[in-house]
Image: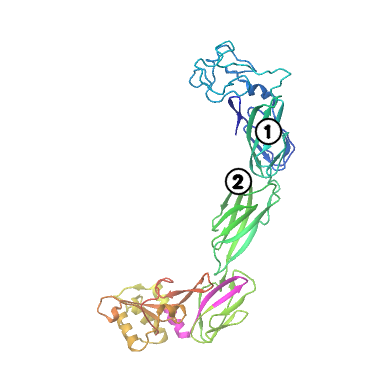
């Protein structure tokens, strides 16, 4: 910062000594080149304003023709100016002289400019007495803008405490107590990080289906001196490696890491010029590695929790369909669907298990395989390697040795819908509620209606439903359920128009 000199000009100041990483005892001389002073927390010593500045308080040390060592440089003061007389009229226009004998009436405006003592008397120039009996500077007073960060006594003794930017104020008085100098300097107190370490350098978190992003990890910075966040000047930055979706913040001497999904990587954290390395692994926890499973009626399957070895509590949303033991072994009791939940502490994850017959499982697998590997072609729909929407359903159900409507030819989607209506296959009730309550069974078909094609209910498409997906938990802890389709991505359709159970 600029030191403000009441005598009529500005002085720039800069500290000469280097910044030290560790605290030390040192006195600091402040002279005309001092601008900013950097300290490390724990440093102590004394601020000393250079007594050699005495001439500059009233004078012109660089000999530019204005005032020097208590005397005017020459007899033509209105011409030898240094910029304070910007229009070269001989008048001081920016900063006035305030000590006794000069600029005594408090205003400018004399047309003749600064005069000697023998002129018209408008301005009487009386240089200050610089003799031994009247020293220009008789005493100093030092103070700090924030004593919690930089404690300074009136005689200039100091101790650096907290990593903050502080203003040091210095006032100088002459022998009769008149203020002859007032200056301020920016003091940058840096935290001492020479012995700083993180409370941990690696951490593992677990991402469950009920995890609410972001997950947070708090890491303390131990061994640092004077490290503060509120009002502090510690420079903070970080870099996250690929494979990890995370952000960081620094507050109250702690680093908080926010993870937004499962992943692993390294975070390089910088505090001032010191770098810390932190490894974060956010493991995805899943039931048996899938969110949707099939179980043949009467069969058993051992469930496992992937991503953690913690003690697990297993539950079934419908034990009459799927029963599961405390060790995670489940049994399909009757056809239907149930949500299996695994809980470890506050973490929960799950999957939807659909109990089907052995034949229906073959139908589902065949329909999915056709949709993935064969080509859609209405003209060639009955040929091997080709299908359309209703031909896919008809060909898949051949795995149950069922010939829907015909043994030799697949019906159209509209004809299949009409047949389902006539044979009591239409599922009654709200489709969205039936889906939410897991009442739709794999192998059911969904018809899209409303086309003006002159066909039954305007049906123009049919799609096979192959089961449910488990999508996580809502904020109130309820399971979020999705849908699976033979020839479409998961959750492609909503509740649909017309459903039938074949």
Residue carrying label 1 = 17
The reply, left or right, for residue 440 in relation to residue 219 is left
Relative depth, front residue between 124 and 441: 124
For the record, the magenta segment spans 340-366
Residue at 69% from the left image edge and 18% from the top image edge: 130
The reply, left or right, for residue 285 in relation to residue 142 is left
- Report the Cα–Cα distance between label 1 and label 2: 22 Å
Per the image, label 1 sits on a secondary structure element best described as loop
Q: Position of residue 244 (x, y in %)?
A: 55, 58
> Would you identify the image quadrant in which residue 499 lies?
bottom left
| Outermost residue, top side | 118
Indicate yes or no whether the magenta region holds residue 345. Answer: yes
Relative depth, front residue between 4 and 338: 4
N-terminal of the pair, mark 1 or mark 2, is 1
Residue 235 numbered tag: 2
Indicate yes or no whether the magenta region holds residue 90. Answer: no
Q: In which quarter of the image is the C terminus?
A: bottom left
Q: Where is residue 282 in the image (x, y as percent from the top left)?
A: 58, 63
The reply, left or right, for residue 420 in relation to residue 433 is left
Mark 1 in CB contact with mark 2 (< 8 angstroms): no
Residue 24 is at least partly visible in this image: yes
> Would you identify the image quadrant in which residue 159 lies?
top right
Q: Position of residue 81 (x, y in %)?
A: 54, 18
Relative depth, front residue between 44 and 155: 155
């Amino acid at each position: 910062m600029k030191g403000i000199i009441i005598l009529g000009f500005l002085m720039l100041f800069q500290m000469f000594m280097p910044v030290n990483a560790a605290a030390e005892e040192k006195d600091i001389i402040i002279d005309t080149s001092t601008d900013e002073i950097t300290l490390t927390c724990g440093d102590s010593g004394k601020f000393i304003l250079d007594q050699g500045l005495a001439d500059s308080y009233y004078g012109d040390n660089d000999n530019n023709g204005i005032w020097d060592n208590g005397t005017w440089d020459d007899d033509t003061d209105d011409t030898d100016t240094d910029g304070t007389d910007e229009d070269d009229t001989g008048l001081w226009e920016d900063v006035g002289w305030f000590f006794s004998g000069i600029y005594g009436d408090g205003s400018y405006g004399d047309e003749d400019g600064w005069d000697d003592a023998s002129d018209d008397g408008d301005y009487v120039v009386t240089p200050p007495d610089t003799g031994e009996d009247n020293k220009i500077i008789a005493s100093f007073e030092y103070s700090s803008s924030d004593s919690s960060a930089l404690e300074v006594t009136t005689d200039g003794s100091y101790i650096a405490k907290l990593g903050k930017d502080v203003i040091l104020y210095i006032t100088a008085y002459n022998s009769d107590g008149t203020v002859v100098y007032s200056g301020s300097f920016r003091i940058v107190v840096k935290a001492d990080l020479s012995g700083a370490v993180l409370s941990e350098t690696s951490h593992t978190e677990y991402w469950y289906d009920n995890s609410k992003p972001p997950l947070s990890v708090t890491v303390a910075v131990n061994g640092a001196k004077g490290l503060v966040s509120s009002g502090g000047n510690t420079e903070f930055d970080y870099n996250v490696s690929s494979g990890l979706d995370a952000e960081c913040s620094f507050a109250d001497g702690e680093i908080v890491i926010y993870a937004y999904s499962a992943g692993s990587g390294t975070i390089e954290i910088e505090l001032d010029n010191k770098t810390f390395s932190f490894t974060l692994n956010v493991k995805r926890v899943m039931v048996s590695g899938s969110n949707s499973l099939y179980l043949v009626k009467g069969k058993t399957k051992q469930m496992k929790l992937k991503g953690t070895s913690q003690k697990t509590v297993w539950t079934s949303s419908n034990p009459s369909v799927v029963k599961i033991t405390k060790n995670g072994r489940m049994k399909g009791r009757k056809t239907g669907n149930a949500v299996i939940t695994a809980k470890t502490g506050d973490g929960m994850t799950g999957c939807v298990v659909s109990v089907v017959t052995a034949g229906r499982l073959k139908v589902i697998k065949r329909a999915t395989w056709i949709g993935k590997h064969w080509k859609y072609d209405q003209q060639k729909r009955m040929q091997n390697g080709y299908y359309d929407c209703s031909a896919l359903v008809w060909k898949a159900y051949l795995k149950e040795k069922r010939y829907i409507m015909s043994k030799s030819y697949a019906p159209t989607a509209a004809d299949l819908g009409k047949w389902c209506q006539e044979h009591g296959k239409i599922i009654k009730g709200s489709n969205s509620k039936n889906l939410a309550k897991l009442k739709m069974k794999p192998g059911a078909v969904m018809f899209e209606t409303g086309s003006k094609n002159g066909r039954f209910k305007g049906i123009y498409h049919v799609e096979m439903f192959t089961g449910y997906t488990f999508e996580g938990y809502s904020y109130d802890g309820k399971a979020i359920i999705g849908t699976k389709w033979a020839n479409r991505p998961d959750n492609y359709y909503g509740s649909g128009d017309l459903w039938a159970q074949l």
